[in-house]
Image (spheres, helix red, strand yellow):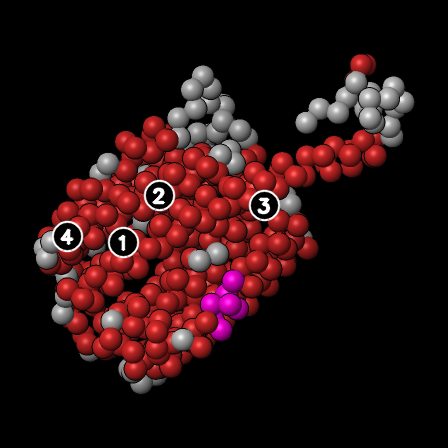
Amino acid sequence: MDHSGSGGRPLVGGSSSPVPPAAAQELSELAAEPSAGRRIGLAGAAVALASAVTSAFGYVVPVLGARTLSAADLGALATVLAIVAIASVPGMGLQIAVAVQRAKNPGSTARHVGWITAAVCAGLVALLTPLAGPAFDLPPTVMLLLAVYTGAIVVAGRWLGQLQGDERFMRLALGMAVLAAGRYGGLVAGLLLGAGLTGSVLIGTVVSLVIPAVLTVVARVPGTVPGDRGVSPKQVITACSATLAMLVVSYADLLLARALLTADVSGAYAVGTVLTKGAMWAPQVVTVLALPRLAQGSKRALTVSIGLVAGSGTLLILASALAGGLAFRFAGGEDYVDLGRYAPVFALTGALYALVFVLVNAQVAAGAKWPSAPLWVSTAVLVVAAWLVPHTFAAIMWCAAGTATLALATTAYATVRSRRA
């Protein structure tokens, strides 16, 4: 809102008396605060709704799988989701890199880098088929379909990053909903139709191919010319590495459970990780809204983000402690109610990783060189610990919780140290 009068002098109440610059700035901020608050509130609600849609789709797939597949196939489905989640993480890194660059340099683009990132991710999944298929007992056809499926998800980060960096949060919410529907809609349809594991993945892959086309329309800004500065491959690699490390460490326990436990027990463990992912992604909206401000160096944005995410995690842990059986019944069905006593531990793990996600984003936004280092170290610790402890449900679960604590402590230390430098 403009509070200037003739000659550009700040005025109060229409008077011709000049107001000191500091007072003028304060009055301007106070006048703008209600509308800014409403805008942020609406944006937060929209992004939260889109995140809820994404989470709902993410819950529906394993929940349907638990009711339509055998325990062994349910474990395979959970492994498929974990592989896609890890392989498509560079899409999140791409989004973060584009958003940070766009916030600092409006109009920055990521045309070629976006498509190259998607092609690399799809190619890696295809190349790993001879190893990953036998290791996780997955058909080669499923792995090849996942390669295409992954590429369509990754490239979406280009358009979502543009919207996030421009703080066009309403359109970002729409884009997130489009991605969620394209990512999970086909899998849901396949499970409802009784298509089995391979058939559901095939349908999911076909549906995912519409994501780029729709997001191109959603992110379009008529009449604008892109800026000269594009997103560099190094920025994308740094953001992708950090985000990939975070997702690897948070999903590694699920993969280890699949490899080290029996098929039935790994299926039960997969139900528990639904709670972990819920606690991890529930406060995602906070980081999404804060990232552009973090890129601009706002310390307050980081403080507020940490407080909100910590509060959300605390509430979810308490809820899991009070209604663990209900949580497991909702996530996997009546057969898994007896595991409700473990619900608070899974929720704690997710809540810790939610805080890690905030700090990782803050480091990337600040231009840190190696924000992923503490997370890769934590992943290595988890793998070693899981192999050394007894191969039981509880042992893997506690290894995951301990690793989340280690990841948060080391990432927090790195963040504090980088800000003091």
Q: Are marks 4 and 3 in contact (CB under 8 Å)?
A: no
Which amino acid is tagged 2?
Ala
Marks 3 and 1, Cα distance to the nearest angstrom? 28 Å
Residue sticking out furthest to the front = 13
> Would you say residue 214 is visible in this rendering?
yes
Q: Which residue is mark 2?
A: 177
Mark nearest the camera among 2 and 3 is 2
Instruction: Please tell me which residue is depicted at 42% across the width and 48% down the height of the picture.
Output: 49
Q: Which residues are magenta?
A: 312-318
Quarter of the image where the N terminus is located: top right
If you read the primary sequence from the N terminus, does the residue marked by circle 2 or circle 3 appear first? Answer: 2
If you read the primary sequence from the N terminus, does the residue marked by circle 1 or circle 2 appear first? Answer: 1
Label drawn at residue 190: 4
Which amino acid is tagged 1?
Val
User: What crowding class fits label 2: few (fewer than 14 Cα within 10 Å), some (14-19), or many (20 or more)?
Assistant: many
Query: Can you give x and y, in whole percent of width and height, for residue 344 in the image?
Result: 43, 75
Label drawn at residue 294: 3
Q: Which residue is mark 1?
A: 84
Residue 26 shown left or right of residue 84 in the figure: right
Above or below, 192 relative to 349: above
Total number of numbered labels?
Answer: 4
Query: Can you give x and y, in whole percent of width and height, for residue 386 in the image?
Result: 34, 77
Residue sticking out furthest to the bottom = 390
